[in-house]
Amino acid sequence: MKKLISAIAIFIFIGFVSDLEAKTDYAKRVGGYFYTSLSPYGTWIEIGFGTPVWRPTNIRRSWSPYYYGQWVYTDYGWYWNSYEPFGHIVYHYGRWYYDEYYGWIWIPDYEWAPAWVEWRYDDYYIGWAPMSPYVSFTISIGLHYSYDYYVPYNHWHFIKYKHFGYKHPYKYFVGSKYKAGVYERTKYRTNYSYYNGKVRNDGVELDRVRQRSGRNIEKRTLVTVNDPVEITRNRNDKEVRTYIAKRDEISRDDFRDVKVERGDRKSSLELSKVEIGRDRTLERTNERNNESTRDRNTDSRENNTINRERVDDQKVNTGSDRNKTRIDEDKRIQERKEVERRNSELEKRNNEQIKRNEEQRKIEERKRSEMERIRSEELKKQNETINRKREESKNNFEVNKQNTQNEIQKRNESRVTEQRNHSNERINRNNEIKRSDNSNRNENRTNTRSDDKKNTTRNR
């Protein structure tokens, strides 16, 4: 009994350790090339289960991925020609995610693409946003969504067609307060495929951009260089240079001296839903191995069939040949049905994913509509308050104006009254003077008469 309990405990411990190693082994599988190349421009942080992410430093507060650069069209679709020293890695490998605590973080992946973005556009605007870590790419399926997640509208860059493809598109981005409206009008158009051994970004048709922008956008040649330093040397309008690292160079083990900080808070990223990285690569390898195994089994069955046919030929049994043919036909029918069943299940899963995405989009639209309604009501109240204050100010102005006019009228009336009184006083003074003059003349006349009489009397 004790041996049984000990065996069970050992089994549980081994399972726990295996699970822990499976979760923490991701950090060891991240290529040394990513570590050493990005360390001078940012910080590596472990955000949980041994998952390292890269966070850029010395950037503007309003910075976001796919901001400084130019869209150019190549044989592999739209290529993001970055102006940043770390752009040849983080815009062509891996995914971006915005965490409320850590900000923008980059999750490594080994699949190269001209750009890992999602697209939206209508007849007036084109928009792009960093593709989330919940989206992976396979040759057989294309884009695969492991989690229902929508990039918020404020993380999108929208621009008019006439400015798309400019060398500094950020100068023409739609303002933050208008993004929600443009986001609602545009439709989701993301499309990726596989071409000539590489991922192709077919987000927006070239002819559509030419027609709506009125510009003849030329297709450039994508030239692969051996050194990232050569990307920025002698740039011209005929070609665009990119660096596609080899798998063995990415995964070389030379990052022991690189410091990886341990995050002090759990990220909002659902790590269990992230399928990018070596895990998907291993799955593809397993798929190819399974296909090889199936091919070998098929060859073995064919050899067995040939041997059986030889035996049948030797027995010269026509009935057995017909039975074998019927069996082979039944097998082919069964295989065809199995393929159709798998395709049906795959289509069903994709339709369910599309349906969930549509439901999530409707929920977000309702939330945004409610927010817009609340914002509209608040704006209406603000306008009413402003109009009321303006009306009160206008009424106060009219009252003040009337009071001012009354005061002016009173002052004018007072001035007229004063002038009239002053004039009357002057007239009275003149009359007094006249009366005084008349009195003096009369006295003089009387005196003169009296003198004359005296003289006359004296003479007599």
Image (cartoon, grey):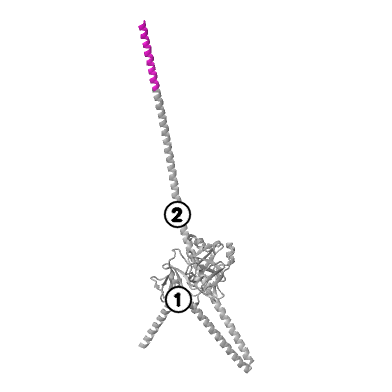
Kind of residue at disc 2:
Gln
Is the residue 384 above or below the residue 361 in the image? above
| Residue at screen point 38% across, 20% down | 436
**Residue 376, percent across and down?**
47, 57
Q: Which image quarter: residue 339?
A: bottom right
Q: Quadrant of the C terminus?
A: top left
- Near-viewer residue (17 or 147): 17
Which residue occupies the extreme top position in the image?
460
Q: Residue at x 45, y 46 (%)?
A: 394
Residue 342 visible in this rendered orientation of the protein? yes
Q: Residues within 10 Å of mark 2 (few under 14, many from 20)?
A: few
Secondary structure under the numbered disc 2 in the rendered image: helix
Mark number displayed over residue 32: 1
Judged by depth in the image, the label closer to the viewer, 1 or 2, is 1
Identify the residue under disc 2.
382
Of residues 11 and 111, the one nearer the viewer is 111
Which percent across, then down, holds residue 148?
48, 70
* Left or right for 42, reference 299: left
- Residue 76, located in which quarter of the rendered image? bottom right
Q: Residue furthest bottom?
A: 315
User: Residue extending furthest front?
Assistant: 234
Quarter-wise, where is residue 447 in the image? top left
Q: Is residue 33 magenta?
A: no
Q: Residues within 10 Å of mark 1 (few under 14, many from 20)?
A: some
Give the residues drawn in magenta, as a range.
433-460
Residue 263 position (above or below residue 329): above
- Residue 447 is inside the magenta segment: yes
Q: Position of residue 226 (x, y in %)?
A: 51, 74
User: Quick one: SS at disc 1?
Assistant: helix
Residue 308 pos. (x, y %): 59, 91
Res 291 label:
none
Which comes before the other along the chain, label 1 or label 2? Answer: 1
